[in-house]
Image: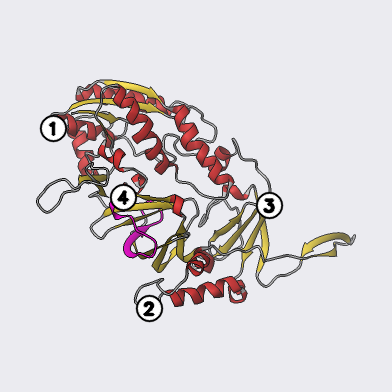
């Protein structure tokens, strides 16, 4: 078997290559460049060149061939343009998930196969297993091909299975994750013992292959900056909101029976999964005279449900739960984004980490956005199951009930979830750590 290791210049992929070489595989390394522009990035212009240099040194140290491929056109078209489009709609995408599905295990895999590779290995902290029956024989899917499982990485602090939640069985058949059963300190130790040039290299951060960015500046390459209001929503609003009170009643109804959600209709589940809409908070203006010259000015009348407390540069640049970058003071507790209205260019915020606008109990994944890593476990309309779910990377797994209806898959959490964000991925796991499926919120 010939294996291509996606060598990034980091310690994880370096040790993945080292282990495969020691295990006797026919291994070669390939470094991919996916980004050229530097606008909005917070690192030097030539960071990718440094990464490539380190990667080449690692390959030489291990004793494996080294190749380079430029996939920047594919990356811009299939990942970055998707990012811009999602932010323009007021959604918050996850480019790392798309990068794995569209680039590492698609465009990169094809480039590796042109060089003779059978599979691609990466430095992800996750585990892949072939599904076997009780007698140890491969279990095959409807297409007659062996089925594979993705499991969480052994290191709970570094598990990266979430980022692979959109991979298909075909992609898994051509994937290897050599360090998925190791802890990060073990990986560092192996790199130092082998005197690899990447042994002390810090982990990469930010957008996959772009790096750390000033997001508004980065997005302004395509999205216009337009000033709008920042509206603070007071707690009193929820006591008068028909939508909020109705949702509370639906939650009570959903959890009244032995199976959460069983008593709700498709329409009621759709209603419960719909975020709160604050557009009904309206502000009237009044004129007044100010100063000794009695200059005529205009101000908003007091509103018991909210107040305009600032200005922003564009609602599409903000996301649910965001705290930094608001430039709003004068509050005893931190202020968080609880909603964005891109059409009206308004940001809604709430004070305090327990603000009602930060929490929800239900989300929906539309039928066309559903992806089953294990197609043999796909839920059918009318079916209900218990899974453990996360809605963002590194979030502890949350207990939830999944119910499939004609109008989508609904996830009812046992406990209220903070900052359920449209555009992100919800991912569900079994109790033994297998990642079964995912979908766009």
Query: Is residue 173 shown above or below 115?
Result: below
Task: Specify the label residue 23 is tagged with.
Answer: 1
Residue nearest the viewer, comparing 350 with 92: 92
Relative to 194, is 330 on the left or the right?
Answer: right
Q: Is label 3 in a helix, a strand or a loop? A: strand
Q: Which colour scheme is used?
A: secondary structure
| Mark 4 or mark 2, earlier in chain | 2
Q: Name the residue under label 4.
A: 375
Tell me how far mark 3 sits from mark 1, CA to CA. 59 Å
- Of tags 2 and 3, the one toward the viewer is 2
The x, y position of residue 57, in whole percent, is 28, 23
Q: Which residue is drawn at 54% across and 36% down?
A: 40
Residue 93 visible in image: yes
Question: Between marks 2 and 3, how big is the CA–CA gap?
Answer: 45 Å
Whichever of callouts 3 and 1 sits on the residue coming sooner in the sequence is: 1
Q: Quadrant of residue 219?
A: top right
Q: Where the N terminus falls, by quadrant?
A: top left
Q: Position of residue 367 (x, y in %)?
A: 45, 54
Q: Does label 4 or label 3 sit earlier along the sequence?
A: 3
Callout 2: 10 Å neighbours few (<14), some, many (20+)?
A: few
Earlier in the chain: of badge 2 and badge 1, it is 1
What residue lies at 29% left-to-right and 43% top-to-bottom?
169
Percent position (x, y) of residue 376?
Answer: 28, 52
Displayed quadrant of residue 409: bottom left
Mark number, residue 257: 2
Query: Label 1 near label 2: C-beta < 8 Å?
Result: no
Most extreme residue toward the right, as rendered?
293
* For marks 2 and 3 on the same chain, the one whose residue lies earlier in the sequence: 3
């Amino acid at each position: 078997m010939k294996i291509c290791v996606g060598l990034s210049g980091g310690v994880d992929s370096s040790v993945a290559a080292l282990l495969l070489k020691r295990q006797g595989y026919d291994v070669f390394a390939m470094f991919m460049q996916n980004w050229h522009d530097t606008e909005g990035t917070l690192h030097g212009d030539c960071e990718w060149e440094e990464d490539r240099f380190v990667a080449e040194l690692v390959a030489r140290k291990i004793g494996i061939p080294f190749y380079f491929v430029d996939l920047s056109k594919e990356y811009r078209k299939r990942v970055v343009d998707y990012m811009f489009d999602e932010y323009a709609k007021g959604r918050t995408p996850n480019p790392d998930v798309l990068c794995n599905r569209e680039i590492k295990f698609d465009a990169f895999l094809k480039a590796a196969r042109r060089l003779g590779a059978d599979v691609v290995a990466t430095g992800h902290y996750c585990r892949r297993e072939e599904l076997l029956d009780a007698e140890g024989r491969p279990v095959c899917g409807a297409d007659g091909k062996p089925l594979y499982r993705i499991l969480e990485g052994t290191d709970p602090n570094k598990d990266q299975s979430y980022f692979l939640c959109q991979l298909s069985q075909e992609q898994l058949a051509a994937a290897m994750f050599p360090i998925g059963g190791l802890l990060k300190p073990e990986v560092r130790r192996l790199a130092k013992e082998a005197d690899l040039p990447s042994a002390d290299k810090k982990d990469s951060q930010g957008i996959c292959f772009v790096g750390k960015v000033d997001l508004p500046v980065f997005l302004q390459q395509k999205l216009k900056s337009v000033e709008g209001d920042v509206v603070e929503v007071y707690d009193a609003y929820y006591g008068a909101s028909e939508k909020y009170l109705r949702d509370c009643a639906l939650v009570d109804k959903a959890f009244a029976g032995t199976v959460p959600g069983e008593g709700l209709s498709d329409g009621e589940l759709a209603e419960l999964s719909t975020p709160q809409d604050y557009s009904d908070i309206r502000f009237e203006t009044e004129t007044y005279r100010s100063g000794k010259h009695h200059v005529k000015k205009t101000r908003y009348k007091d509103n018991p449900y909210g107040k305009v407390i600032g200005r922003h540069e564009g609602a599409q640049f903000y996301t649910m739960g965001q705290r930094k970058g608001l430039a709003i003071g004068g509050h005893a507790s931190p202020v968080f984004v609880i909603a964005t209205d891109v059409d009206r260019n308004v940001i809604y915020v709430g004070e305090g980490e327990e603000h009602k606008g930060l929490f929800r109990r239900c989300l929906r994944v539309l039928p066309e956005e559903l992806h089953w890593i294990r197609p043999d476990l796909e839920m059918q309309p009318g079916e209900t199951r218990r899974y453990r779910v996360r809605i963002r990377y590194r979030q502890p797994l949350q207990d939830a009930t999944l119910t499939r209806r004609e109008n989508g898959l609904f996830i009812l959490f046992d406990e209220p979830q903070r900052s359920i964000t449209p555009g992100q991925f919800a991912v569900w796991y079994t109790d033994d750590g297998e990642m079964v499926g995912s979908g766009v919120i």
